[in-house]
Structures are given as C-alpha cells and as structure tokens.
C-alpha cells in the first residue's frame, strides 16, 4: 500500500511488514516503536530476536495493520481543539491535535504508568516540565517519562502529535471530559497536581 503525507499506519505485534520509499524524492517520517526495545537492541549489537525482530515465519496471518490517511481519524473535538485519533493500539495511541490560539492546553499533571510525547508539526508549544519552561517548534519532539510532572499549551495556532505509550485510555478519558461527565482521571493514569 502507498501511504501519502499525513497518514498514519500501525503494525501490531506479529504483523509481517516492511517499508521503502518508492518515489524519486526524499521522504520524511516518524517511525515509533512501543515498547521501545528495537533501537536499544539493534544498536547494542544484540541478535534480532532480542530486539523483537523475527523472520516472516513468526507472523500471524490474520493480524492487520491499523491507520488512516491525511485528515482521517476518529474525531474528538471541543472548542479550540480538534484531535484526530490516528492510531489506537494497546502499546500506544497517536493523536493529531489541531488547536487555535485560544487553546488552554493541559494543567500540571503526571502519569505514573505511561510516557506522554509531543511532536510539533506546525506552530509552537510551551511545556513546563518538572518546573522548567521549554518552547518547541516544528520538527521538535519532547518525551515526558512516567512520573515527571508537566503541563503545556500552544503559542498561537498549532498542530502536533501526542503519543501515549502504552495506551492508557486517554481517548476515552477526553471523550468523557468533553461530554461533561464526572471522571476520576487517576483511572486513566492522569494525576492532577497543584
């Protein structure tokens, strides 16, 4: 299958897959692995089986890729924020945020069991991570490990990817909050801090 810019494709565990650039122009893409054993094992010189890479004989025939094209994805919207759910797997979720200048971001909180990552596509984000303010623009990523307090907002209009790994029910949490339901954020590994 050909995958145009703005697409997201997820290869669940045991899916036999590969990829290449079929065009005559350079391609730029993010390649996310969750859990992140691939790079650590490969660059440490470990045998492929130890960094979760196996031959096609280990594949499972009924496993299918997940994903969608540019502008596609399950929509979760509220005033000043549209997010497209690009991938929702047990290992991770990938959310494509489109926010206006009036977007209020997220107040100070912490996740204890999953990492929260941001990759800026357009505009600029301001993050406060463990007390330090960081501004990031297009092409920059920030990974917040479990247990690190953080908050963020946009600086004007922005578009960014937000990845939670492993998947923590974050999409379900946002849907409930947006619908005005009373939700215990701790159930979704989100702990609000003062």
Image (tube, rainbow, N blue to C red):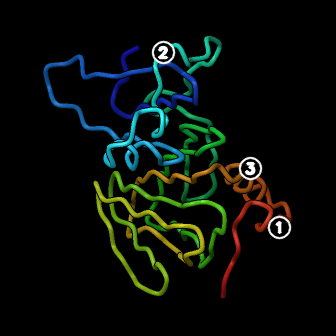
In percent of width and height, residue 162 lies at 50, 54
In the rendered image, the residue lying farthest to the right is 182
Labelled disc at residue 184: 1
Residue count near mark 1 (Cα–Cα under 10 Å), binned few <14, some 14–19, many ≥20:
few
Q: Name the residue beneath numbered marker 3.
A: 172
Q: First in sequence, mark 1 or 2: give its number.
A: 2
Q: First in sequence, mark 1 or 3: give its number.
A: 3
Left or right: residue 19 compared with residue 111: left
Q: Quadrant of residue 87?
A: top right
Label 1: state its secondary structure: loop
Q: Quadrant of residue 31?
A: top left
Residue count near mark 2 (Cα–Cα under 10 Å), binned few <14, some 14–19, many ≥20:
few
Label 2: state its secondary structure: helix
Q: CA distance from mark 1 to mark 2?
A: 43 Å
In the rendered view, tell whether residue 69 sits above or below residue 124: above
Nearer-the-camera pick, 158 or 30: 30
């Amino acid at each position: 299958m050909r995958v145009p810019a703005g697409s997201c494709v997820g290869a669940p565990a045991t899916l036999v897959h590969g990829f290449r650039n079929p065009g005559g122009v350079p391609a730029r893409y993010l390649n996310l692995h969750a859990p992140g054993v691939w790079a650590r094992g490969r660059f440490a010189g470990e045998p492929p089986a130890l960094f979760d890479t196996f031959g096609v004989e280990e594949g499972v025939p009924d496993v299918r890729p997940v994903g969608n094209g540019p502008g596609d994805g399950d929509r979760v919207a509220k005033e000043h924020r549209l997010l497209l759910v690009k991938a929702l797997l047990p290992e991770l979720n990938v959310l494509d945020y489109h926010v206006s200048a009036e977007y209020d971001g997220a107040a100070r909180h912490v996740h204890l069991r999953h990492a929260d990552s941001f990759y800026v596509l357009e505009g600029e984000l301001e993050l406060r991570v463990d007390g330090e303010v960081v501004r990031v623009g297009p092409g920059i990523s920030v990974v917040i490990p479990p247990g690190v307090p953080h908050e963020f907002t946009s600086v004007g209009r922005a578009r960014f990817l937000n990845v939670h790994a492993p998947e923590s029910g974050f999409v379900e949490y946002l849907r409930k909050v947006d619908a005005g339901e009373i939700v215990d954020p701790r159930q979704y590994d989100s702990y609000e801090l003062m």
